[in-house]
Amino acid sequence: MFTYVLKRLLTLVPVFLAVSFVIFMILHLIPGNPVDNLLRVGSSPDMRAEIEAKYGLDRPLLVQYVIWLFHVLQGDLGTAIVARRPVATIIGGALPYSLQLGGAALLFSSTLGILLGIVAAWFRDRWPDQAIMGGVLLGSTLPSFWMGLLFILFFAVWLGWFPVSGVRGWQSLVLPVLTIGFGGTALVTRVTRVAMVDAGGRDFVLLLHAKGLSPLRIALGHVLRVALLPVVTILSLRIGWILGGAVTVEVVFARPGLGTTLIKALSQHDYPVVQACLLMLSVAVMLGTLIGDVLQALLDPRMRHGHR
Amino acid sequence: MIDRSLSVLKVALGSFKGRVAAAWLLVVIVAAVFAPLLTPYAYDLQTLSQAFQPPSASHWLGTDEFGRDLMTRLMYGARTSLSVSVVAIGLSVSLGLVFGAIAGYFGGRVDRAITVVVDLTWSFPEILLALILVAIIGPGVTGTLLAIGVAYLAQFTRLARGQIMSLRSETFVEAARSLGASDSFILAHHLIPNTLAPVLVTAMLATGDAIILEATLGFFGLGAQPPTPSWGGMMSSGTAQLFRAPGIILFPGLAVALTVIAINIFGDALVAAMDVRSRERKA
């Protein structure tokens, strides 16, 4: 198992290099001189010289990238232009809020989604199934930020049950989690339903029926175990999407997480912060995929030994 | 080809759901195309004395914080949102077909290079890819258009590559080659036309996702810049008025939601209709 994790981790290295190179290139692809893009308007020549020396901006592009990457890997993400603070401090402050929201949303959508998927498969083509699948269509097509605004309107403004925005206590986490969870649950429900129906049609289920087991026991004790494998696969591929949803929803609820920081920095042309946020989100997506793969290997021993 | 598409369209419109979805899409397209003829107001005309009007006979959906007619802005917004999404997906389809066809037909080193890039971008959510691109190109219509186009490129390259690879060894391709047809002729006249049907249906469904992505970028203030209305941009400026005039956010969001749902229902009906066709052909 350990070697499997190590192998998967190693395959992420080239991906990380490629992604970080693209993010590094942002500074060179946008109009204007990279030095100007890293400094406030009207900075002194001394500061220009300092930045130039630090990032080796007179050297070849590839050397510049290596220097930049070296700084990043040591946790030096540069200084924010607008906030005039180290970017690492800003990211460190925002990250917990995003992790909290992403984690809670993931937990919520996978639990509820698997539950609803089982119910839908159990009542296949009857009204509970149709009702759930109708909700799934809504969940997978409605824009998440709009759902968030609707939730704010109903639950926060009209009913006054939860705070409108900000991060005061667990109550402020409820609406954002529901917002991301709506789309996430739709996805997990759909996958679970298909997997349950598919696994329910296999030969071993016939044998279990012949043995006289109750249908409910077959569904929960046997079919579900087989069905969970594709669910974990899809879920692992989609962890990034759920985190991506978190970016949008953070902005709606004014949570000071990575997404809000990124959007604010984009509109302020604060490129060191933009780069750092994009890098953190990309790493989160990569780690999400890795965790999914490891979970899958735990569930399916064939994966670990490369029989596939 | 045209006969076949017509028969598919007929089957897709056969169901009640399919008809309703198609009717809504038609309404939105007509409103977008003929907006200047359909509304007496200008989308950027500010009449501050008319701000925050409730829905009435003269302002069907009311007015926003600057006294601009919401219905008018919604129709002009449909112009921006639909054209950006459609052109962006058109960009990813055409580039995706070219890259996918090259990778799938020639194989070898080109295929491996294209596949590596596709697999790399495939694992990232479209919104993250789009944000990286907007960071480079800058906000605005062009920025969002290119960002969305590139964000969906991997999907279409992958689809086209798979299709071309499975068709490459069919008998009719071998026959064409033995008659002396060149690679480019086979690709343009035999392989790409045969991949069009699945690609176009996927493109339709992707357009729905693209509308949401465009609205999201617009909501972040990165899309079409004011005063040009877009559905996302309208919601972005509406957040400040959430308590006073929820309609500024409700209506554009409803427009996005209904359009995307209609695209999904109609797209699914098309897929089902094509399945019926292939079943009939086999029987």
Image (cartoon, rainbow, N blue to C red):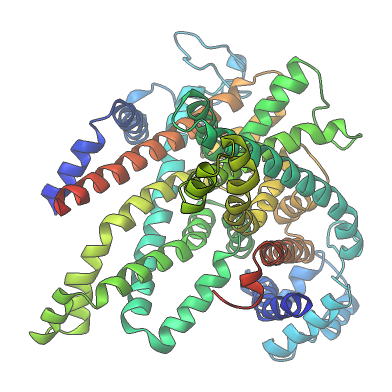
Residue B280 in the image, given as x and y percentages of width and height: 16, 47
Residue B99 in the image, given as x and y percentages of width and height: 38, 74
Say which residue appears at 39% left-offset and 21% top-offset: B40
For the N terminus of chain A, the image quarter is bottom right
Q: Nearer the viewer, residue A136 or B42?
A: A136
Q: Nearer the viewer, residue B30 or B47?
A: B30
Describe residue A100's horizontal placement relative to residue A203 as left or right: right
Describe residue A294's horizontal placement relative to residue A45 as left or right: left
In the image, residue B51 above or below residue A188: above
Describe residue B270's horizontal placement relative to residue A161 as left or right: left
Say which residue appears at 58% left-offset and 20% top-offset: B67
Describe residue A146's horizontal placement relative to residue B73 as left or right: right
Residue lying furthest front: A211
Residue B25 in the image, given as x and y percentages of width and height: 35, 33
Say which residue appears at 46% left-offset and 59% top-offset: B149
Q: Is residue A47 visible?
A: yes
In the image, residue B209 above or below residue A151: below
Residue lying furthest top: B57
Q: How many marks?
A: 0
For the C terminus of chain A, the image quarter is bottom right
Q: Is residue A143 visible?
A: no
Residue A48 in the image, given as x and y percentages of width and height: 84, 77
Q: Nearer the viewer, residue B12 or A301?
A: A301
In the image, residue A56 above or below residue B250: below
In the image, residue B12 above or below residue A106: above
